[in-house]
Image (cartoon, coloured by chain):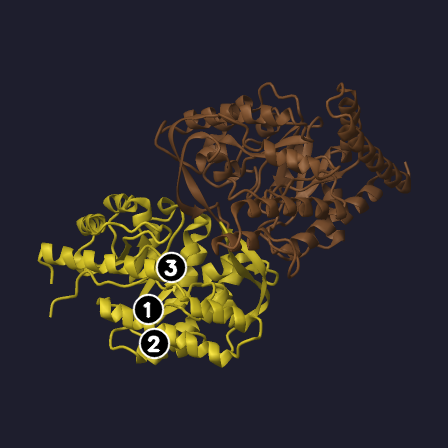
Amino acid sequence: MADPVLLTTSVGSFPKPDYITKARAEASRGKMPRSELQGLEQRATEEWIRFQEDLGVDILVDGEMYRGDMAAYFAENLEGFELGGAVRSYGNRYYQKPIAIGEVRRPNSITVEWWQYAQSLTNKPVKGMLTGPYTIADWSFDEHYGSREDFVMALADVIHAEAVDLQAAGAQYIQIDEPAISVRPEEFDIARRAFEVVTAGLSATTLTHICYGDFSTIYPAMLDLPVDNIDLEMANSGYVLLDSFRKAPFTKQLSMGVVDVHSHVMEPVEEVKAGILKGLELVPADRLLIDPDCGLKTRTVDEAKEKLRIVVQAVREVKQEKGLA
Amino acid sequence: MSAPLLTGIRGVHTIISTVLYRVDRTFAGAPGNWYRRREHILEKRMRQNLLSTTVGNYPRVALEAGGASVRRAWTRLDRDQVTIDNVHTEEDGFTTEVLKEQRAAGIDVVTDGQVRWDDAQTYWARGIEGFDITGLIRWFDTNTYYRQPMLKSAPKWTHPIAARDLEYAKSQTDLPVKAVITGPYTLAKLSLDEHYGDLQKFTFALAEVLNQEAKALEALGPAMIQFDEPAIVRPGNEGDQAIFEQAMRVLTAGLSTKTALYTYFGGIGQLDASRIFALPFDVVGLDFWMGPENWDALESFPAEKELGLGIVDARNTKLESVDEIVEGVKRAAGHVSTDRIHVNPSCGLEFLPRDRARAKLLRLGEATARAKEALS
């Protein structure tokens, strides 16, 4: 069988339906038992799994109905962290930035149960979703370690243990997101060494999502990351990142973001197809995966679904027109 | 002079300026004597031993449940429960609260907390003709984001951008209020440029635009005008120093108000420090947390300049003890005379949760008072 080409996937998060938003607020005020909230989160997860299946997405995500912030979620489930008050991210978006107050330890696996639940709903592969040690550290306050490197490396051990558990549970794809990795080019080596710790000995396909930074400062260095697939946002910058690949060929699998997740505007399918074709000029079809730029959680449910539909339709048309299997 | 006396004098100054403030209001429109006299007293106060100040933004969430909150106002607007006018009223009320919080902490020179700034780039770019606003992008190495401005045509100053905010803040406090402007180099560096395609031209054009803005603000009587230029101390930008220096001269041309250049998110170690110190600003602000090498730069700090001592880490929740802050002030006082030191956080306090921002503010105020006693 030929290698699959232009597989479609998602970066990770989907928007929470209103009933989850309300339930989370009630649960946080102590007005809803944890178990009831969890039941609703399972229902929402199933809805998103069904939606992706019906649409024909190839590699699914659980949509992270049970997570708040991608870094804080791990901190909440690790020893050594407490959650601080709300800190503004942009506009009117806030998150509770974790504070490291002691040695970071993982008392139990964090993501395995949810992954198992999501995978039980479908025959398509569901990605295991982790946040990388560099990003968790960068998005936390540190009152304990006093050294960014020590803090990152301590988290690397913890996230490695989680990845091993996901693989043991059967995950074929494990994504370790490091959106912060491009922020301080001078610390790239710390991030890379941490990543080596995380992926050491894994046989599952590993992916990482990187975004929002000065790309030119860490490319082609990022190709040294011990990971199979790098997921990059392209649509919101008009695919300018692809120019870097002309100078230094992209040697890994690329998951290419083709719709802007921070815009209400729906990209015309033709525009997305043009983006995919640009990607195909530089990365062969069996190494090119297509997805939205980033997690879709900041869009409305309807907008997110429509953006995903556009992605899948554009891929379908490109495959047809190009005669790709 | 004994410490209690100093404290007493400060108290008297506060009373006098409060009285004069009331007189100002009574005599609004009368010949400028009252203003001049008040400015004279404020100026005297500004020269006293060690001043505490803030650098800029402040968390816009409630201190405790039910308290004033700009965040909640915007959320309600999103849900169509209030109008944009309600949000603006809430922002005004919140500004007043932030000013009071600084006063209660004993801060000598205050800012309005920038609670109306979407971010430090678009607050200005939206007000200047020639910019479009594009997608979200990370702001330096913080986990905060801004919408990236894109220059489409030659930038033009058409109206005062921050005048209303400054006037409002001044009306809500008897303390001297700083005006803060994002500097032209940082504004250019963090924007896309479809017009000049040339950083130097872009930066100079913005320097002229912001010079006009500064003149408009100057007329409103701020305690000083602070220009923020974090971009110049970021790794890789040291090659722009010559452009930066020329732009700073354009920026400050013809201003008579006290001016400050604030750098943060790094140290000036990669730059030629003596040339930075020689720029036409009265105050140079340095970040001693993200730029510990700034301690070395202090060795050559010119006697005629004032130092903005970024000694409280505004990017980490870990609280410095009052003693630690006092020690830092004493260390700086080994290089800069105490009547030329502004004690402040390393940058704006909005990177912290509100309770920690307030705790840092309180310690900053207390440490400045303690250092004042210890060093007098």
- The answer to the question of whether label 1 and label 2 lie on touching residues, with beta carbons closer than 8 A, is yes
Mark drawn on residue A300: 3
Is A203 drawn above or below residue B365 in the view shown?
below
Label 3, residues with CA under 10 Å away: few <14, some 14-19, many ≥20:
some
Q: CA distance from mark 3 to mark 1?
A: 17 Å
Label 2, residues with CA under 10 Å away: few <14, some 14-19, many ≥20:
many
Is residue A216 shown left or right of residue A8? right
- The answer to the question of whether label 3 and label 1 lie on touching residues, with beta carbons closer than 8 A, is no
Q: Amino acid at mark 2?
A: Ala
Which secondary structure, mark 3? loop
What tint does the image give chain B?
Answer: brown
Is B286 drawn above or below residue A255 in the view shown?
above
Q: Which residue ends up furthest to the left in the rendered image?
A: A323
- Mark 3 or 2, which is nearer the eye? 3
Quadrant for the C terminus of chain B, please.
Answer: top right
Is residue B334 shown left or right of residue A56? right
Query: Disc 2 marks which residue?
Result: A118
Q: CA distance from mark 1 to mark 2?
A: 8 Å
Can residue B232 be seen here?
yes
Which x, y percent locates residue A29? 58, 71
Which x, y percent locates residue B240? 46, 31
Which x, y percent locates residue B8? 89, 39
What tint does the image give chain A?
Answer: yellow
Mark drawn on residue A61: 1
